[in-house]
Amino acid sequence: MTIADDIIALEKAALDRWCAGDPDAALALSAEDVSYFDPFRESRLDGKPALAALYDGLRGQISAPRHEMIEPKVQVVGDAAVLSFRFVSWNGSEGARVAWNATEVYRRDPEGWRVIHTHWSFTGAGLAAGQADA
């Protein structure tokens, strides 16, 4: 397996658990100095404790039994790798489709590849939260 294969597999496994309401795999992939952006936050989160608090508030509230990582691309530079992809999920109760753009920056640490920066945005400019359809 290549570095790209490894990173994509790590991310897919974390997304599978995330879409079942369990953020622990995503949190386990995060470095202590992780930073995080998403469209629901006014500012960046810094550090694993802040990310853990955010994820704890979401635990059990996400249900997307159908989801897909589209066109993942990994760019490796030394002990860093940037994973970018599109992500589409369908929520379990209403079947609503939500489309995202995502970027994860990984760093190779002694314990393996860890996410040092996450950025999620809705696909398409100016779309309301949860209303993405591209």
Image: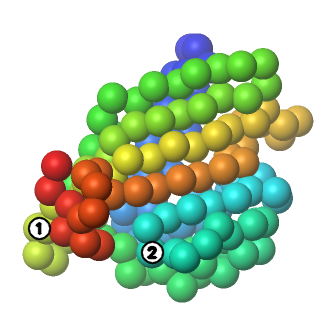
Q: Which mark is drawn over residue 36? A: none
Q: Quadrant of residue 99?
A: bottom left
**On screen, residue 61 above or below 48:** below
> Which residue ends up furthest to the right in the rendered image?
110
Residue drawn at x 66%, y 50% as measured from the top left:
117
Residue drawn at x 36%, y 73% as measured from the top left:
62
Secondary structure under the numbered disc 2 in the rendered image: loop
Residue 56, horizontal then vertical, whole percent: 59, 81
**On screen, residue 61 above or below 7:** below
Residue 108, horizontal then vertical, whole percent: 78, 32
Residue drawn at x 59%, y 52% as measured from the top left:
118
**On screen, residue 24 above or below 108:** below
Residue drawn at x 58%, y 14% as measured from the top left:
2
Which residue carries the number 1 mark?
95
Q: Which mark is drawn over residue 40? A: 2
Residue 26, horizontal then vertical, whole percent: 58, 57
How packed is label 1: few (under 14 Cα within 10 Å), some, or many (20 or more)?
A: few
Q: Quadrant of residue 114?
A: top right
Residue 38, horizontal then vertical, whole percent: 49, 64
Taking depth in this image into account, of 14 and 123 the one nearest to the observer is 123
Along the polypeptide, which appears first: circle 2 or circle 1? 2
Residue 66 placement, left or right of 115: left
Residue 68 placement, left or right of 79: left
